[in-house]
Image (cartoon, grey):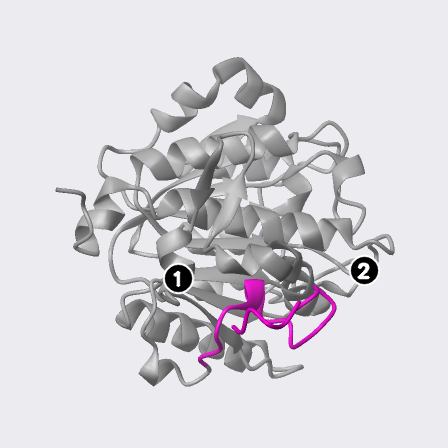
Amino acid sequence: MSELRLNLPFVGIPTFQRSPVVTDLSQLDADLAILGVPNDEGSPWYPGARMAPRAIREQSVRYAGYGRMQASSGYFDIEEDRRFLEYETANERIVDCGDVDIIYSNPEQTFKNITHSTAQILEAGAVPIVLGGEHSVTYGVVRAYEESVCVVHFDAHLDYRPFIHGAEYGNGSPMLKIGKLPNVEKIVQIGSRGMRAAQADLAESRANGNDVFTMKGYRRAGIDNVLSTLPKGAKVYVSVDIDVLDMPLVPGCASAEADGMSYEELRQTIFAIVKEHELVGFDVVEINPMLDIPSNVTSQLGAQLAIETMARAVENTGYLSRKGRLPA
């Protein structure tokens, strides 16, 4: 990028954090691959989550730097007084793979497309960083994995609803479907709360071997006890429904609940997980730009969360070993 350009955030084509675009996944050469899944046909309430990948990308440009900041790679964390993602941005190891092709009124084909695109990213050795879409899309992503993974599920809801009238691609059921995949070792669910929880769903989730931390249970247990539920050496897929955060933080979310996580609680829990366990995939879902306030703070929060998660995940020793980049 030329230093002669100022490149203000409202200038140019908003790829994720101004990353290069690679839409031919057979030619993918990257470490972290952004993939949009703009599907919201599984939502039983307000539509609009299909617009989230585009909105998150637009907000992510604010973290790309402009003016003299473009001379430095990565981003500066003022709290930790250090830079993150320097290697990845300087060497174009983060790429934007565009969006999965959504076939409206044909969820089976849409989900085949989700799985196929994810499989291509995994085959290239990159980590999928997925921008939803509503939460059903997580199933299409996770079923692409052949290796064993543990799924860490941040959500105000269990997403364990049974299929009614064959509606198996709804956003209330992805964890029920994911738990049946042969490559999923276990699921840890964090943040559940609210008056819409179903007693039978909780019982079934626990009966299937999942660890469930309600919001108050999470605060009582603490991060270390959450970490202890993950098998040593397990590779993790982290799925974040933005409604895990407290309602005032996420005005652009159709399923928000009161008394949720603070952003600091969420980020520190994810940081602890990806420090101890190699991250093999991540998604942030249920952001609805059509409901958001004009400053698009919910989409901005999703962009920040994805960036900060990537920044910590690339420092995991298992990840660095796989990339041949462990310090001497």
Q: Vertically, is 186 above or below 20?
A: above
Residue 46's disc number: 2
In magenta, the rendered stretch is: 1-22
Q: Position of residue 44 (x, y in %)?
A: 75, 59
| Image mark count | 2
Amino acid at circle 2: Tyr
User: Residue 169 in the image: x percent, y percent?
Assistant: 58, 65
Q: Percent from the top left, x then y, of residue 124?
A: 28, 72
The residue under the point 57% across, 28% down is 265
Does residue 151 appear in the picture of this structure? no
Image quarter (top left, top right, bottom left or bottom right) of the C terminus: top left
- Amino acid type, mark 1: Ala
| Residue depicted at x 67% and y 37% | 245
* Residue placed furthest toward the left: 328
Q: Which residue is mark 1?
A: 90
Quick one: SS at disc 1? helix
User: For mark 1, does the 10 Å Cα neighbourhood hold few (<14), some (14 to 19), or many (20 or more) residues?
Assistant: few
Q: What secondary structure characterizes most of the magenta part?
A: loop
Q: Secondary structure at mark 2?
A: loop
Q: Residue at x 49, y 32 (%)?
A: 81
Dot 2 alpha-carbon crowd within 10 angstroms: few under 14, some 14 to 19, many 20 or more? few
Residue 113 placement (x, y as % from top left): 47, 79
The residue nearer to you, when weighing 227 against 77, is 77
Q: Is residue 115 left or right of residue 1?
A: left
Residue 305 in view, yes or no: yes
Q: Is residue 18 left or right of residue 256?
A: left
Q: Is residue 256 magenta?
A: no
Observer-nearest residue: 195 or 73?
73
Residue at screen point 53% across, 76% down: 98
Q: Nearer the viewer, mark 1 or mark 2?
A: 1
- Asked if residue 58 is positioned above or below residue 231 in the image, the reply reads below
